[in-house]
Amino acid sequence: MTEPSLNNDELTRQEIREFIERAIRENRVMLFMKGTPDQPRCGFSARVAAILSGLGVRYAAMDILPDPRIREELSALSGWPTIPQLFVDGELIGGCDIVTEMFESGELQELLGVDASANEGDDSARGQRTEPSPPAADTPSGPAARPIPLENNLRDD
Amino acid sequence: MPSVDEIRGRIEAALPGARVTVEDLTGGGDHFRCEIVSDRFRGLSRLERHKLVYAIFGDEIGGPIHALSLKTLAPEEAK
């Protein structure tokens, strides 16, 4: 599995970068966060995951904490220093502040193609809660709000 | 550990004429919230505005400054 001509550290860092690039390319809505949507390890990551889950959006999430190089490579790639980072259609949308502002203005719902009217005028959805309301079952707009399990294959098991 | 005054001063130095308010969210000098009104933000997306501010602090973001929560407005957007 190792190629003797390559430096092992370089190879692994390259693999991490390629994994991140593939995750962004292959998942329309891709969230890099601290922890997981079910067990976030940072309030900012928790808020973005809660917004996405509350909108009933199908998204992939990747925990950046298992290896510090994940964050280093991600930030080098995106030019964005902090976590969380949300990508849609391969493009960086922003971190917690931007995602929250876009959610409150309805721009996020528009970008993601979900029904904004479900949240408009509902003050309880505007940052008051820490937990999203459970999405309605079998919403016609899309699949269930369960994040796609994204296997973190960067660690040696 | 940067202070509220230091954060504000550095933003004002980098964005002359900006109106800057900074709040230390935890009192610990590492989680800040800033609202910045600057004509430099005109014509820029939110992403570009935030990157402009993050660039002032470079590697300190995510290091000594654990979190810098931003609200970035052009003058005509400020109420």
Image: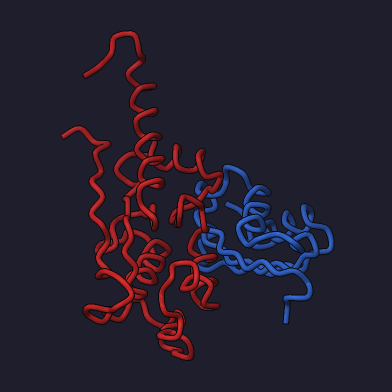
Which quadrant is the C terminus of chain B positioned in?
A: bottom right
Residue projecting furthest to the left = A157
Residue projecting furthest to the front = A140
Q: Chain A appears what colour?
A: red
Color style of the picture:
by chain
Where A49 sits versus B48, above or below? below
Question: Who's the residue at 25% across and 65% down the image?
Answer: A146
Question: Who's the residue at 66% across and 55% down the image?
Answer: B53
- On screen, residue A17 versus residue A94, left or right, reads left
- On screen, residue B34 versus residue A102, left or right, reads right
| Residue A156 vs residue B5, the one in the foreground | A156
Question: Who's the residue at 47% across and 87% down the image?
Answer: A120
Question: Who's the residue at 54% across and 48% down the image?
Answer: A80
- On screen, residue B11 versus residue A91, left or right, reads right
Query: Based on the displayed image, in which of its 4 quarters is residue B6 positioned?
Result: bottom right
Percent coordinates x, y for residue B34 in the rendering:
63, 66
Residue projecting furthest to the top = A5
| Residue B14 vs residue B8, the one in the foreground | B14
Percent coordinates x, y for residue B77 in the rendering:
73, 75
Residue projecting furthest to the right = B17
Q: Which chain is blue?
A: B
